[in-house]
Image: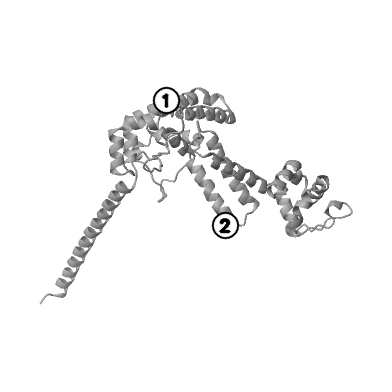
Amino acid sequence: MCSPACIRVTIRILKILGYIIFGILAITSALCFLCVSYVTLLIMLPPLERVHIHYMTKLTRYLGYDNYERWDPNAKFSAWGAPYDAACGEIRMVLLKLDCMEPANTCMEKIVMFERDEWIRMNRSVQEKIFHNVSKECFQAMNDPIIRNQSFYHGRDCFMNVSREFCALDILYYLDSYYEFFLKFAMTPTQDGCGIYEKILSLDCQDSMEDFRESVVRLKLGNQTKDDYLEVAKLCDEMQNCINNLTTSCAISLEFKRKTKEYCEKMHFLASPFWQCIQRLKTENVKPDLMKYVCLIGHELSDDSTACQRFSGSSECIEGFMMDQCGFESVEGFEDSLTYLLEMWDC
């Protein structure tokens, strides 16, 4: 039999062996975790080393591009770290023109030179104003059909690599085999009529048009407050500015442009102090001083059936009543607002 001293020594040796085995298992587990994490990061993250313009400069802040959240699970990025969306037949890479193309390098050289030579000698407001003009000049140059054609010609590999993420094999085969032929139609203005070049050009306004459509849907579902109308009006203005700044907007139907112009005007009107005053007077059914405002005798402000008759009467009387109730702001441009109101009501 083993003596008590022998038993104690055995127990101590077993404890030491247990600690050693536990330590080995812990180290092995940690190494496995690090390996799995490293492989996961390699697979999931875009290659940061190739982001050479979009994330390294101020340029996008002045060109109207938002700062996309790299970690947003819904955001899609090209291999160049730039957000994009694309569809076969109407391929659109949001930053393709800036990420891969020679004019982007020329533009950046110009801006860097400007900052080096002029930045120190100007106050901040002048700096930002002139920098905006420089970047705007560069951005407009990208819409020049000749520069645009050259850009896509020299950026063929960039274009094809991003297209492979989305397009079917037959379309990839066509682009790979007939790229120069594709450029002839897609990047050269059409001589007569409205062709592929003009349709691709109009895609620059696709985001603003979609934002506008979504705001209209939200407006129909919401309470239709002044802020709701202002939001739609703002997005509508942004969409119209985009369309108006296109070299040609022939790919966007005249009917769409006419209807959205009318809708924009209506949204601005519904958000105006003039309309908000009328709505408040109607909702609260305000009782006017009939000795002072004789044009309102026999009228209930909450009665829509007599609205045309009420506002088609003495404009000076109505204007004075609204100014007393809602302030001077509500009657600025009164005649124009009143004319629009009567037309909207088909009076």
| Residue hosting label 1 | 146
Disc nearer the start of the sequence (1/2): 1
**Which residue appears farthest toward the left when viewing the image?**
1
Label disc, if present, on residue 328 of the rendered structure:
none
The number of numbered badges drawn on the structure is 2
**Image x and y of residue 69, in percent:** 44, 46
Mark 1 → mark 2, Cα distance in angstroms:
46 Å
Q: Where does the image place residue 43, in percent across and percent down from the top left?
A: 30, 48
Q: Please state which amino acid type lies under the numbered disc 1.
A: Ile
- Please determine whether, in this image, residue 49 is positioned above or below residue 130: below
Residue 94 appears at what percent x and percent y? 43, 39
Residue at 43% over, 33% down = 195
Query: As rendered, which of 125 and 205 lies closer to the eye?
Result: 205
Q: Is residue 204 left or right of residue 259?
A: left
- Residue at 82 percent across and 45 percent down: it is 316
User: Left or right of 150: which side holds 138?
Assistant: right
Circle on res. 221 = 2
Q: Please tell me whether residue 141 is drawn above or below residue 79 in the rendered image.
A: above
Q: Identify the residue at image location x=39%, y=34%.
A: 99
Three-letter code for the amino acid on which mark 2 is drawn? Leu
Q: In which quadrant is the N terminus drawn?
A: bottom left
Which residue is painted at 48% across and 43% down in the image?
Answer: 207
